[in-house]
Amino acid sequence: MILGLIYPDSGRIFINGTEFNNSRRYLLRNIGGIIERPDMYGYLSAYENLKIFAALSDKGIKAARLQEVLDIVGLTGREKDKVKAYSQGMKQRLGIAIAMVHQPDLLILDEPTNGLDPQGIAEMRALIQSLSKDHGKTILISSHLLHEVEQVATSILIIHKGRKISDGPVSQLLDPDKTLIEVSTPISDRLMAMLRETTWAQYMEPAQPGLLVFKMNPSHVPALNKWLVEKEINVYGINTKHSFESYFLSITDDTITQN
Amino acid sequence: MIQLLRIELFKIFKRPRTYISFGIVTAITSIIQLAMLSDGKSFLAFGLQGIVDQFDIRGNIMNGYLVAFIILQSLLIHIPLLVALVAGDSFAGEANAGTLRLILTKPVTRPQLVIVKFISSFIYTVLLIVWLAIVALFLSLLLFGPGDMINLKSDAFVLLLRDDIMWRYAAAFAFSTLAMTTIASLSIFLSVFADNSIGPIISTMGIVVVLTILSNLQLPFFNLIKPYLFTTHMIGWKGFFDDPLPYKAIGRSSVVLGAYTLFFLTATIIYFNKKDIKS
């Protein structure tokens, strides 16, 4: 919708204070995007694809810029290969190159790690961070992969059931003191009674079958583990749930309850 | 707009599929030419059996002009299919590949894109017809030589002198280009509704086949609608091989084909401009 592919049922879209419908061509000259997957012409080479989309951006982009962008995304040496022979990760990187070749102020990346293997995901994460830090790009990422978002985002906006339910800087939204810590252990009345008499009680969340749940800073985990061992409690595992994930689940659960 | 057109043409002519059409035209014409070389005389004898008793026909009757005319008649259905192969793919192929979304995230307006796809399909059609002229007409002239041309009709036969034929072919090819442009605009129109190119290609051919059958049915009801079917007018090129030339009929057919083309193009722009692009 932000890129004008789908029309809104109601409301208007503003980018940097300019209404999209009135200045579509002007705004799109300064926006780059990948939507879900990096689609391009498989029968053309990466360089030809890049050249086509650079020409479409209407900014008179020179060959040197094409090469520069290929360097940034790490495709130099493979630019003459047909795109149909590319791996998903290479296509994703070429997609980024296409999105940024015209030096846009804003990059919109929809699920940029879709279909990538773990190495590809790590490379994409590093590329996104580099584009932001080294090239000064503002990047808007839309993703369901909360852990990935948490690692690269500086600000987060959560949309649930079509409505914005939360937004703000990561440092404010993701309080490490609210990280969920799950301890796999047999739950007994004796254990619960002992816990209620300690300082751990203040961090406790409702227990689940075979699972103690604490909401606290992960730095407390060694001390908790030590206490459990001293009390001869069998611990089968301790799982630290990412703070964004727990925040997201808590806020969307609340919303569901409210609805 | 020019830049966008250059990109469209680059994409069309970089794709191997585009050249299949040129290959098919070459193959069909070559097969017919070979058949005429080997058995043309008996074919001609069969065709002229009703008139040889009344007329003394001499000279190079099986000449390049006649062979080209026979080839063009037999390609009536094939050429629309070849045009639809490219035009039907124009939007649906891009939607299937996902590149339509990427194009529309660039500073390109939707009406611009439709017009450019139409112009590029038109250029492809012109090149296909030019290629057809080269292999069907000029190659036939090379193989069979020139001569006066006999145009056998159901109720008459027309004899065209060799010096009076070439301009008729030029006009016929120009008219065919208009007819095929109508087919291209229909294919493009169908293409904006689909997410893969098979649908619009088959739909275009289905429409052409059904309407061609209706255009040829000799029933009173169909006689009423025939003048409004574009398929009735697609064979208007044959008029250039009549004597005297049916100017009115050719002019009317040109107007109908032009109107259909304009209608399909306008409908495509209106629909595509409102469409949510999800793939």
Image (cartoon, coloured by chain):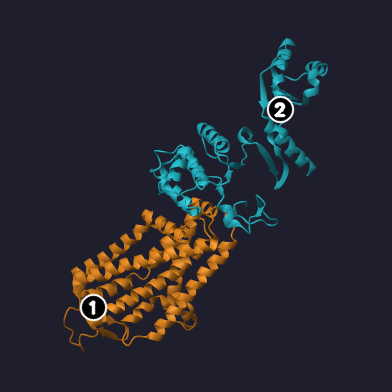
Chain colours: A cyan, B orange
Q: Residue B218, position in %: x, y?
A: 43, 81
Q: Residue A42, position in %: x, y?
A: 43, 48
Q: Is residue B206 visible?
A: no
Of the two numbered discs 2 and 1 in the rendering, the one whose residue sits closer to the viewer: 2
How packed mark 1 is, by other alpha carbons closer than 10 Å (few <14, some 14-19, many 20 or more), is few
Give the amino acid type for the residue marked by disc 1 in the picture: Phe
Q: CA distance from mark 2 to mark 1?
A: 94 Å
Q: Which residue is mark 1?
A: B46
- Nearest the viewer among B38 and A247 is A247
What residue is at 59 percent from the left and 53 percent from the top?
A: A27
How packed mark 2 is, by other alpha carbons closer than 10 Å (few <14, some 14-19, many 20 or more), is some
Q: Is residue B248 visible?
A: yes
Q: Is residue B28 above or below residue A122?
A: below
- Nearest the viewer among A225 and B225 is A225
Q: Residue A47, position in %: x, y?
A: 42, 46
Q: Which residue is mark 2?
A: A176
The local secondary structure at tag 1 comes to: helix
What residue is at 52 percent from the left and 72 percent from the top?
A: B263
Q: Residue A69, position in %: x, y?
A: 47, 42
The local secondary structure at tag 2 comes to: helix
